Image: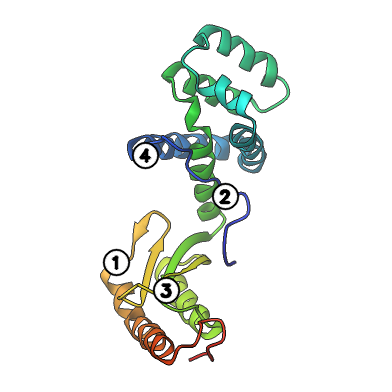
Amino acid sequence: MRGQRAGAFGVSAGVTEQEVAFARVYADAVLELAQQSGDVDVLWHELQEIARHAQSDEDFAMFLASPIVDGDARRDTLEKLFRGKCTDLLVDTLQVLNRKGRLHLVPALAEAYRRGREELLGRIEVRVRSAAPLTESHRQQLAAVIRQQTGKEPDLLETVDPSLLGGLVVQVGDRKLDASIARKLDRLSRRLRERASRELHGGRSFVEAAPV
């Protein structure tokens, strides 16, 4: 898959890297519990809905994050809104975040849960920045390398950055590529860099350029 992943959630403004790391820890724990209860997919759909509301409904976002809202009152409201309508695991997760003052991390937790679920299903998110757009041949080469190294089916998220001197930057999940994968991609990176250089000097746009 190319471009933005379906169901992906960006990190809310003001959320620090440390808080994103906390969200990943929570997501890993919740995913493990969801596996035990058989609620992996159900919980994912519930988290999607909560995260969407948190990002699109200003009043709901304020309810989750505002320090003005009393924690006990928020706890009671969460119970009334979700208990019996959603999985107990979702409600319990929201209550833990409420006690810790981290309900504003719901979108980040949903995104981390999404990634964990994808890996559980044998898929892995691969972010690719390239100096020129990838051709279908490039995608197949890249996917083959990632598949060989990780044993998972890659979902490619592609962005084009003509100023990229290295030709190609690849990040697998939350991890940078290790040296062995980087070496396998070195030839592809050189070809992309050379192609970008030719097109820049030739005055052609990347869209019009013929595939390598």
Q: Residue at x 66, y 36 (%)?
A: 49
Q: Position of residue 134 (x, y in %)?
A: 50, 79
- Residue named by callout 2: 8
Measured in 3D between alpha carbons, the distance from the residue under mark 1 to the one under mark 2, in whole angstroms, is: 25 Å
Q: Which residue is located at x 29 percent, y 73 percent?
A: 180
Mark before the other along the chain sequence, 1 or 4: 4
Query: Alpha-carbon distance for marks 1 and 4?
Result: 21 Å
Question: Tag 2: Cα neighbours inside 10 Å, few (<14), some, or many (≥20)?
Answer: some
Q: What residue type is labelled 3?
A: Ser
Q: What residue type is labelled 4?
A: Ala
**In this view, the mark in front (3 or 2):** 3
In the picture as drawn, the residue positioned furthest to the right comes out as: 85
Q: In this view, does 206 lie above or below 4?
A: below
Residue 3: which quarter of the image?
bottom right
Establish if 33 lies above or below 120: above
- The colour mode here is rainbow
Q: Mark 1 points at which residue?
A: 178
| Residue at which label 3 appears | 130
Disc 3 to disc 2, C-alpha distance? 21 Å
- In the rendered structure, which amino acid carries the disc numbered 2? Ala
